[in-house]
Image: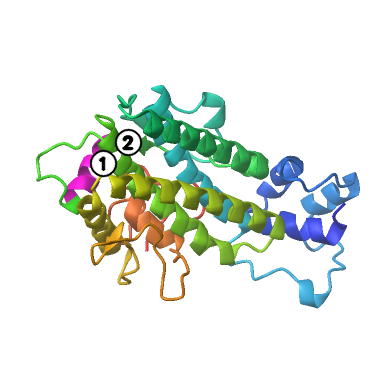
Amino acid sequence: MFGKNFVKDLIDRSAENPADRRRFLKGASAAGLGVVGLGLLGAAAAPAALAQDTTPESESLEDAAAISDSAILNFALNLEYLEAEFYSWAVHGYGLPGSFTYGKGRRGPVVGGHKVPFKSKSVQQFATEIARDEYDHVRFLRGALGGAAVSRPGINIGTSFTAAATAAGLIKPGETFNVYASENNFLLGAFIFEDVGVTAYKGAAPLISNKTYLGAAAGILAVEAYHAANIRTVLYDRGFSWYTNAISAARDSLDGPSHDDQGVTIDHQANIVPTDANGLAFGRTPGQVLNIVYLTPKVANSGGFYPNGVNGQLHTSS
């Protein structure tokens, strides 16, 4: 059982605003926080000036301007909505159940997407496994956030891929890239998402203060890394190195001045695991991630895969 000071700290840190605190408490048990007394519920809902705080100064809350755990988890949930919809449509021909799409903020439709005509049994099985994992990620994050979870924003998994493929030079302006038309196209689309997902969780991890959620984020990061390595290996074996390197260069041009992104080959040698000189995976800030998924190298609140932007506090690209 967690102590009262710990849970009060968690509630305050994990609410994007004071109105979230009571809603978050209702969903806290889903994240394994245990049951707290009604007295704590009253303290969590009371004005700060009236609530007794016995937390030592060394354990005091961060500045109110700090990014809350809830904001970070909701940012991750926006990304998981995109991945889950992408894979669900590819494997099943339909998206997430409606019950998984409601929450705070504007709920939007999913445009594009249909079942992929898989030819390889192994690729189809890989896609099915990943689709199940992404579904579980959405379910887990929504359960952890409770009433503070954001709605699924509007998602474009149709023409956005054409824009991304054009930016990467895979097709000429005016041509169409249907990511669901073949399993090769599907794999290239998955390559765009998986690498970005890994860097997003790596970049967000240092911002999470609660160890329970940090551990959960690390678990999802590991799964996304497994997915990315799987997709990168298949593309390498199929001789799609040039395509992945072109996509990598496009992501690099979108996310900012750094040049960390890597394709599946370097100097004609396999590069399944993109790392720095110390063998460490690199991370991206939420703003850099949004630069990529909005398909814009400048500050923006929407675009690309999210025509109306993402929901939650972290919604502006850098």
Q: Is residue 269 above or below residue 179?
A: below
Q: Looking at the magenta stretch, what is its main secondary structure?
A: helix
- Let me know if residue 158 is in the magenta part: yes
Residue count near mark 2 (Cα–Cα under 10 Å), binned few <14, some 14–19, many ≥20: many
SS at mark 2?
loop
Q: Amino acid at mark 2?
A: Ile
Residue 40 rendering spot, x and y as whole percentages: 86, 51
- CB under 8 Å between discs 2 and 1: yes
Residue 312 relative to residue 242: left or right:
right
CA–CA distance in space, label 2 to label 1:
7 Å
Residue 98 relative to residue 26: left or right:
left
- Let me know if residue 211 is in the magenta part: no
Coloring applied to the structure: rainbow
Residue corresponding to mark 1: 161
Camera-side residue: 241 or 300?
241
> Which stretch did the figure color magenta?
156-166
Residue 304 rendering spot, x and y as whole percentages: 30, 46
Residue placed at 52% from the left, 32% from the top?
101
Residue placed at 28% from the left, 52% from the top?
295
SS at mark 1?
helix
Residue placed at 48% from the left, 28% from the top?
96
Q: Amino acid at mark 1?
A: Phe
Residue 221 rendering spot, x and y as whole percentages: 54, 53
Quadrant where the C terminus sits is bottom left
Quadrant housing residue 180: top left
Residue corresponding to mark 2: 157
Camera-side residue: 151 or 244?
244
Quick check: can you spot residue 242?
yes
Q: Is residue 144 above or below residue 11?
A: above
